[in-house]
Amino acid sequence: MRIVELIIDESDEQSGIEAVSLVHSPAIEENFIALNKQEILLAEVDKEKRILMGAALVPNKQIYRKNDKTGDEYYIYFSKDTVRKASELFFKRSNHKNATYEHKQPIKGTTIVESWIVENTKKDKSAHYGLNVPEGTWMISMKIDDEELYKEAKEGTIKGFSIEGYFADKYDMTKQESLEDIDRHMLVEELKELLQRQELESYNDYPDSVSNNARRGRELNKAVGNKCATRIGKLRSKQLMDKEKLSVSVIKRMYSYLSRAETYYDAGDKESCGYISYLLWGGKSGKNWAESKLKQIEREDLASMLIDDNFAIIDDRLAYSSEAMAQKAATDLGVEGIHEHEYEGKIWYMVGETHNVDMYDDCPDGYEKVNGKCVKK
């Protein structure tokens, strides 16, 4: 099984940590602790501050990973130097208020109020609070305004921090696919999609840097006699140059190819097929966009789900299986009318004449109105 060192690519503006997530099972396997009122009470306030302390990144710790999009199994780790760079870049980009729950739901009202690198394991503040972390660990303290989240942490349901961001890969592999093997696999997958003749949702909101990489790849390939890449790679570069829309299947293949072929990308050898082919598929910017887009699509899918025969969630709104149920709910809420939605091959009914109807005059404490709905702040 290959071992991947994740590093900061300082030439890539997207490289680094975007957010810290509160999770039930932290990948770094180090639990944070909740600081009590006496230890953290600030002089200028009179109410308890909800603060959690824990490790955000532990250096040289191998973490098992399985990529659900490619089926690839591997281990990742961060060096001490990368941990320090990541922590510095995180604050340089003012990401200290970016947080999510289980890497899916964005959380408002969180702020990282303290950050440091462990220099001496015995004298460090983490040791004082009973945390045993190695030298070079990035420690953080996070203020949590959400009472329920803080309660989950104190009760042990939420167990730690997990980072979200983009890194470049350095491969230390026991077995390595050839570039030809990767190209052959992409060709087979492309042909499968063509035979299915299905066109679902597609997207072209990738940044200009992706198109520019593809254009540069074509220029370099022409200069070496078009010896690099398969017809699929050349087709992909044309699509990216022309800002064509890409289906979800293509985006998955794009991410898969760029993840697997990155080991052949050598920025110092601009005539190599590894370098040229990587650019044809969008380069590092293409990989980052594809991963971000797939994560976005996954989160959007979570906004709709079938609960049972009587209820469903459609675009974050409750839907009913019958007109009578929806009409009763509308009456109870004091809202006029109902409307229909088709989901999973069935007609569902929802309160309000349109999907964006404002069903609430005022929201409860701790909630705010967003597009006619009350959501947690």
Image (tube, rainbow, N blue to C red):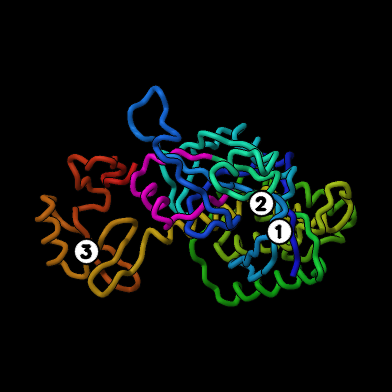
Task: Give 114 or 313, whichever is nearer the viewer.
Answer: 114
Q: Mark 1 points at which residue?
A: 258
Q: Name the residue under label 3.
A: 349
- For label 1, the SS is helix
Quadrant of image for the C terminus? top left
Q: Can you name the residue that lies furthest to the top here? A: 44
- For label 2, the SS is helix
Between circles 3 and 1, the one closer to the viewer is: 1
State yes or no: discs 1 and 2 in contact (Cβ < 8 Å): yes
In the picture, measured across the screen, residue 60 lies left or right of residue 49, that is: right
Residue that appears at 29% across and 40% down: 368
Mark 1, Cα crowd under 10 Å, few <14 / some 14-19 / many 20+, is many
Residue that appears at 87% across and 61% down: 227
Is residue 343 shown to the viewer in this render? Answer: yes
Counting residues from the N terminus, which is met first, the one under dot 1 or under dot 2?
1
Q: What stretch is highlighted in magenta?
A: 141-164
Q: Point out which mark residue 286 bears.
A: 2
Task: Reply above or below: 71 against 56.
Answer: below
- In three-dimensional space, the C-alpha distance between marks 3 and 1, rounded to whole angstroms, equals 43 Å
Q: Could you say where residue 202 lies in the image, as x and y percent from the top left?
A: 52, 58
Residue that appears at 65% across and 64% down: 64
Counting residues from the N terminus, which is met first, the one under dot 2 or under dot 3?
2
